[in-house]
Amino acid sequence: MSERLTKRDENGNAYYDWGCLNRNHWALGRHVDRLAAYEDTGLTPEQIRELQNAFNILFESEKQKQQEIEKLKAVLADWQYNTKCDADHIAALTTDKDELVKVLKQARESLQAAWEDDGSTTVGKQILETINAIDALTVFEASQLISKRKEEK
């Protein structure tokens, strides 16, 4: 750094002492303040340019990172929406399945009662086959629930 052109008074105000101008001359005030601020950094013009280039590189990098963050936020919002839709769909299917199981169990009870009244006839044998098919479906459903609970743990 070369020799300072400005000085600071006891209050910290910058001035340029040319001898021929008053130190508080209105025409120089703003410019002297700027020159003094530069001189206060202790940096050369080359160092200032290097810092400016480094700042520009960092700023651009941060801007790109922010753009990537915004893109990722949008992707996350889509995933959250799709997950909620899927969860709603699964809940609806589960409710439908539960209702069907309930109807199948009621049908089984009715068929069981009819078979016990007349289990020796052909109709009674068909009723028994239907009961066994319902049992197979409800046992399958129970095994799925057990598997699902094990996966959740």
Image: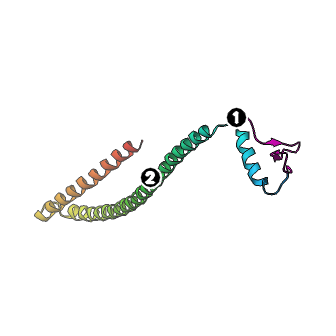
Does the magenta portion include 16?
yes
Residue at 70 percent of width and 39 percent of height? 41
Q: CA distance from mark 2 to mark 1?
A: 50 Å
Q: Residues within 10 Å of mark 1 (few under 14, many from 20)?
A: few
Q: For residue 88, what is the image quadrant?
A: bottom left
Q: Position of residue 125 (x, y in %)?
A: 14, 60
Q: Which residue is mark 2?
A: 72
Identify the element where label 1 is drawn: loop
Q: Which residue is mark 1?
A: 2
Mark earlier in primary sequence (2, 1): 1
Closer to the camera in the image, 39 or 5: 5
Does the magenta portion include 145?
no
Q: Position of residue 26 (x, y in %)?
A: 82, 57
Q: Position of residue 53 (x, y in %)?
A: 54, 43
Height in image: 81 above or below 36? below
Q: Which region shows up in magenta?
A: 1-23
Closer to the camera in the image, 136 or 111: 136
Q: Residues within 10 Å of mark 2 (few under 14, many from 20)?
A: few
Q: Residue furthest front?
A: 20
Q: Position of residue 152 (x, y in %)?
A: 40, 44
Q: Name which residue type carries label 2.
A: Leu
Majority SS type along the magenta span: loop
Height in image: 6 above or below 137? above
In the image, is 131 to the left or to the right of 152? left
Residue at 85 percent of width and 52 percent of height? 24
Q: Name which residue type carries label 1.
A: Ser
Identify the element where label 2 is drawn: helix
Q: Quadrant of the C terminus?
A: top left
Closer to the camera in the image, 131 or 102: 102
Q: Quadrant of the N terminus?
A: top right
Q: Residue furthest left?
A: 122
Residue 142 circle label: none
